[in-house]
Amino acid sequence: MRGWPLIKLLPQKTNFRFVKYAPAAGVISIILCVASIVGCFYPGLNMGIDFRGGASMEVSKPAGQVLELDKVRGAVSELGLGDVQVQGIDSAASAIVRFQIPEDEGQSAVVARVEKAIDEAVGEVKYSGVSVVGSKVSGELFTSGLLALGAAIVLMFIYIWFRFEPQFGFGAVAGLVHDMILTFGLIVLFRFEFSLNTVAAILTVIGYSMNDTVVVFDRLRENLRKYKTMPLREVIDLSLNETLSRTIITGVTAVGVLAVLALYGGEALFGFSIVLMIGIVIGTYSSIYVGAPIILLWGVKRGGSIDEDAKPIKLGMASRP
Amino acid sequence: MIQLARWKVTLVVLSLVVGLLLAFPSMLSQAQRDALPGWLPKNGLNLGLDLQGGSYLLLEVDVPEMRNKRVTNLMEDVRVALREQQVNIGALQREASGVVVTIADPGQFDTALTELRKLAQTGIAANGQPDRTVSRLSGNRIRFAYTDAAVNGMGATAVDQSIEVVRRRLDSSGTKEIAITRQGADRIVVQAPGQSDPAELERLVGRTAQLTFQMVDTSSTGLQDAMAGRVPPDAELLTDDQGTPFLVKKRILVSGENLTRAGVGSDQNGRPAIDFRFDGQGARRFGEATAQNIGKPFAIILDGKVISAPTIQGAITGGTGQITGSFSIQSASELVNLLNGGALPAPLKVEERRVVTAELGADAVQAGMVSTIIGFILICVFMIGAYGFLFGGVSVLGLMLNGILIIAAMSLFGATLTLPGIAGLVLTFAVAVDANVLIFERMRDEARAGRSVIASMDAGFNKAMGTIVDANLTTLVAALIMFMFGAGPVRGFAWTLTIGVFTSMFSSVMVAQVLLGYWLKVAKPKKLPIAE
């Protein structure tokens, strides 16, 4: 059986000129990043109650019956609880209702009022999964969420700085910031809820993206020592090509598994898995097109011998030492 | 490296056995677990509230409100103490932690000062020092205030006391396994798993249960004036359940703190009532107050509502009494429970509340299990497809050991599995095979460079190891941050990620080394099956 194991089908040696397309990729990345940042403010993130405060509850009718979303929406809207969202889930029988809690009223009183209004509008329903977050706590959660993302980037930078060299650190951090911004952009684009779980997903994306970057950088460092006279851009291309089959296999595995989670993990894990999936695709792209080219722009010390420093190279120009 | 070292084989076999022993109880029901012989580990996976259902409450102790009340009380103490000595109060000015009294007649200044110094000696703070100080100010003024230490201590003491009170209240209502923990400076987290009624839970912690006995203001026009908006400075306007107004003196004669025991009894008409007994101090104070005020009404007040306002028939010196009011048996026994649990030193505000029904939790477990199994199968098919039965199979076996070890480690450390945690688990599987992919790819590279089977396998393990460690450490950093900043479910995710990093590094690398080493020894292959 030739061609099996399937790994034999992947070419042993690829020779993609990744670096050649780096300028174009860079322009695209910058445009997408700017669009994402703008998107975070206008239309803005769809904040979940974790960060915005308010209440969310799951309302369901017995299986087989239909929950009339319009009636639920109408009933809750009449209570004057600010921004009311009613979103159907899975079957026609259940929905998630979100509303705000007025400052001067007790949480339980408001929840009781909403339950009563829904009961009156659509008859007997069941309430499962009620969450209420006070405005004070939600503000703190938001701050700590953002702090967590910032801390992650700083720690990764320090880690790479120590394990590799400063240039590698900058490359890695540029990749991370890029991944994070684009993930945010896609969260805005798909109107996913931005919640504590989303922050966990983004942190995981950061971890994965670093993982990917480290594999590439590791090979790059090794090749820089091995081929001391090869131009930097060629070493980068070589390293990217050498790690390509691993990048593909691992990436496909991770995305495949996350697709399973999105399909079978239920409502609660859907957004979470999709954000992870998107993030991993972006992270893989950035290890190739953000991290490595930045090292190219910056230049790097070669093979421990100080006299053989590679000079920074202008992109788009073939230069030979 | 690839040589079959005996210690590696031992380690893998040992970890498999120990892992199975520790992971095994998680597959059993609680009853089966209880029936296990004593020497076997019994801890199953600790499911988060989002998986087993339950309520999570984040409560904030209203410390400013409590300080406020303390200062109000202190003000009344000063007023009463000075009046008893016939000292004329010119002005009583409230400050953040006490009051400033202006003595109208300079001749009475020394009397007032002595009296207030005496008063300051009656209260003792936690550190054994008096908690109130007296200081002379210019212009016939005296400041009487809580010491800084007392003010600062109030918050911490209040949270500690509140935790105690909440625990007594919730445990006496029969709910089990409730975790009550402190969070930050002034918050309390209550986690009650299972199908406890969240509304009842909130009712139990939401009431301060501050019981006080205060005199009713009986001046002829007092009530009318107060209702017209002119409430005297030493009194407050309260209502009972029916909305009947009462003008009540602010000074507290005796409070719930002096109760030793409350119980459900019945009044002379056979309706439910609450019997109570005071401690020594309470009995003395109550006795004095009742002796001085025969014929006048006093009010029994719970959380700012008047329960009843009986007229004092005679001095009550025995230290026991009865509260009558419109109680049902249920409300009476609920109140008794609250009174016996003690009053909260300050109101608790619910800042965050998350309730997941057991049914929803079970659905989540179901969905999580299905997706974990499908995800696992997908990875197995993919790895065997990509690398063949030998190399792919080796990583599948490593993955299985990994799964067992993760469950074992989580049971051992009592880590909590949450829904995002399940996602973390599935993702860990994907990243675990990454270690194998790195090793195998490296082997292919080396074989392609013309090395022998043994040499390329050896180099594969050696060279890939640094990358694997580096790559896994980054995941660890991300997990660490989730621990520091995240709450509940996110921490559960961090737990699985962290444990997964260690177990997957061990099982992907060790299992592959042992199995492939064995294969080398037995099959003595001429070429690497995954390389051309």
Image (spheres, rainbow, N blue to C red):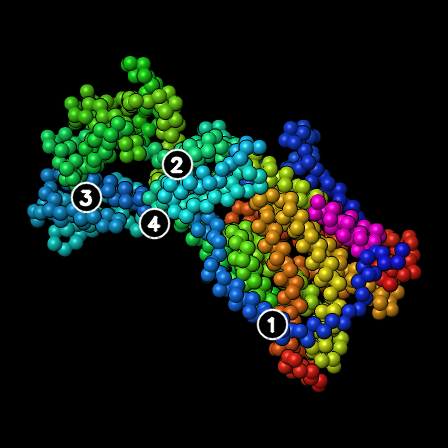
Which residue in the protein does label 1 denote? Answer: A26
Q: Which residue is mark 2?
A: A113
- Foreground mark, 2 or 4, reads 2
Query: Dot 2 surroundings within 10 Å: few (below 14), some, or many (20 or more)?
Result: some
Q: Residue at x 60, y 67 (%)?
A: A175
Work out which residue is located at the far bottom of the displayed protein and give it.
A321
Q: Is residue A267 left or right of residue A42?
A: right
The residue identified by callout 4 is B152
Marks 3/1 in contact by CB < 8 Å: the verdict is no
Q: Is residue B475 above or below residue B70?
A: below
| Amino acid type assigned to the residue bearing label 3 in the image | Leu
The magenta span reads: B374-402
Give the residue at x 44% y 41%.
A73
Number of labels in the image equals 4
The residue labelled by disc 3 is: B116
Marks 2 and 4 belong to one chain:
no
Q: Main secondary structure of the magenta part?
A: helix
